[in-house]
Image: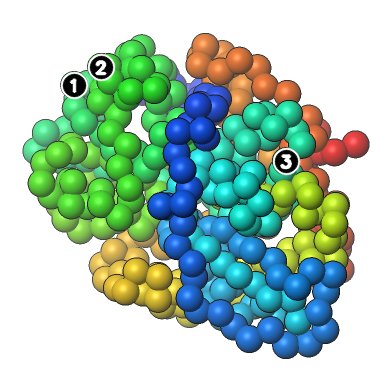
């Protein structure tokens, strides 16, 4: 391991996932072509809550397995009763934030970077983080014939899912930590950052258009099945190997207007995570069935078996790691200090957790007053 890497690891490398405010990404990426209606709907039964429907956004990634399993098993719909759950999938965070801002979705599973971007861009008016979902599940995978060490990334083409998404800004800041330069808008520099839809990244790798990728699961393990090698697991860059990769967010308008629906949804998410952690094999099968429903093809056993253990499913939003990401981004000079006070509203979640006999979670001082 290079000395520079060892030094950075000793510092916890929280800056590896720091969050530049790529606000322009929110305007440059239309969400219409990214969104896909989730055709599998579970029948709504029971008493309708204060809203007829709740529109959910999430990604067809294993890091969003709370959503995959919650929809597939009907665990989210069960808690919503007669209020209909309407799911839609997205490729990455910026497009989902646009949908939230356009009032096309009400609640979403999403990464920390677009959560911060959306919060700051709206001056804290459009969204709140209301819960956690997952930690980990992100890897840097490379062509072992071209890249053998982290220093070998210089001059290579590395994919991320979308400009401004969590993995994109994590990789951009990792590059800064190495002392290299890349233009965050174009992706050009000492390393070429190639924004590539997760669906097409494996083909781009096989064709030689990219030399590797900093991506979430299952894309990382798909590349490994095609001959790539894991060069870095992002969880190894964090103390206790925990960092937020997926939050649950809600539009402020929906939270204010339908607190009963938000609480019911969170109750479903908590019960889904409990079921996932109690039944890992069944949950893995369920998530794969949902992915097949969305894409027409299930993941091979080799891929999902490698991907699944790297993800931890948790109700805790790991708020301190969100703050650490922002703080280290500021120190690296890639982010103007954002005002994050009020980005979390964990009162509904803590009410649900208390009722379930589970410990409450912290907002790390970033909650609504």
How many numbered marks have been drawn onto this rendered protein structure? 3
Q: Which mark is residue 190?
A: 2
Q: Nearer the viewer, residue 213 or 11?
A: 213
Mark 3 vs mark 2: give the one in front: 3
Are the residues tagged 1 and 3 within 8 Å (C-beta)? no
Is residue 11 positioned above or below 168 on the image? above
Q: Which mark is residue 137?
A: none
* Residue position marked by numbered label 3 in the rendering: 126
Q: Earlier in the sequence, mark 3 or mark 2?
A: 3
Asked whether, in this view, residue 243 is left or right of residue 351, the answer is: left
Q: Nearer the viewer, residue 325 or 37?
A: 37
Is residue 311 positioned above or below 78 on the image? above
- In terms of image quadrants, where is residue 364? top right
Mark 1 element type? loop
Residue at 32% in and 24% down: 187
- In terms of image quadrants, where is residue 254? bottom right
Q: Earlier in the sequence, mark 2 or mark 1?
A: 1
* Residue position marked by numbered label 1 in the rendering: 155
């Amino acid at each position: 391991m290079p000395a520079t890497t060892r030094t950075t690891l000793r510092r916890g490398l929280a800056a590896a996932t720091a969050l530049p405010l790529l606000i322009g990404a929110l305007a440059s990426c239309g969400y219409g072509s990214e969104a896909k209606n989730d055709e599998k709907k579970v029948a709504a039964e029971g008493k309708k809550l204060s809203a007829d429907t709740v529109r959910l956004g999430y990604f067809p990634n294993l890091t969003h397995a709370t959503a995959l399993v919650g929809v597939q098993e009907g665990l989210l719909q069960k808690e919503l009763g007669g209020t209909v759950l309407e799911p839609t999938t997205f490729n990455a965070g910026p497009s989902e934030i646009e949908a939230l801002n356009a009032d096309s979705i009400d609640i979403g599973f999403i990464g920390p970077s677009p959560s911060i971007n959306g919060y700051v861009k709206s001056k804290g008016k459009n969204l709140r983080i209301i819960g956690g979902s997952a930690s980990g599940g992100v890897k840097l995978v490379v062509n072992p014939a071209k890249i053998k060490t982290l220093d070998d990334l210089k001059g290579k083409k590395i994919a991320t899912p979308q400009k401004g998404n969590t993995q994109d800004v994590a990789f951009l800041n990792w590059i800064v930590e190495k002392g290299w330069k890349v233009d965050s808008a174009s992706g050009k520099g000492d390393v070429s950052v190639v924004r590539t839809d997760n669906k097409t990244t494996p083909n781009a790798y096989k064709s030689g258009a990219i030399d590797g990728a900093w991506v979430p699961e299952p894309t990382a393990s798909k590349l490994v099945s095609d001959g790539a090698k894991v060069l870095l697991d992002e969880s190894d860059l964090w103390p206790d190997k925990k960092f937020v990769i997926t939050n649950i967010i809600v539009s402020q308008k929906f939270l204010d207007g339908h607190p009963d629906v938000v609480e019911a949804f969170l109750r479903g998410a908590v019960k889904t995570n409990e079921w996932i952690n109690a039944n890992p094999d069944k949950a893995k099968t369920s998530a794969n069935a949902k992915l097949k429903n969305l894409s027409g093809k299930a993941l091979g056993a080799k891929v999902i078996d490698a991907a699944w253990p790297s993800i931890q499913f948790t109700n805790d939003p790991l708020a301190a790691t969100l703050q650490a990401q922002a703080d280290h981004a500021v120190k690296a000079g890639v982010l103007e200090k954002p005002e994050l006070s009020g980005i979390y509203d964990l009162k509904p979640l803590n009410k649900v957790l208390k009722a379930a006999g589970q410990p409450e979670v912290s907002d790390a001082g970033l909650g609504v007053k």
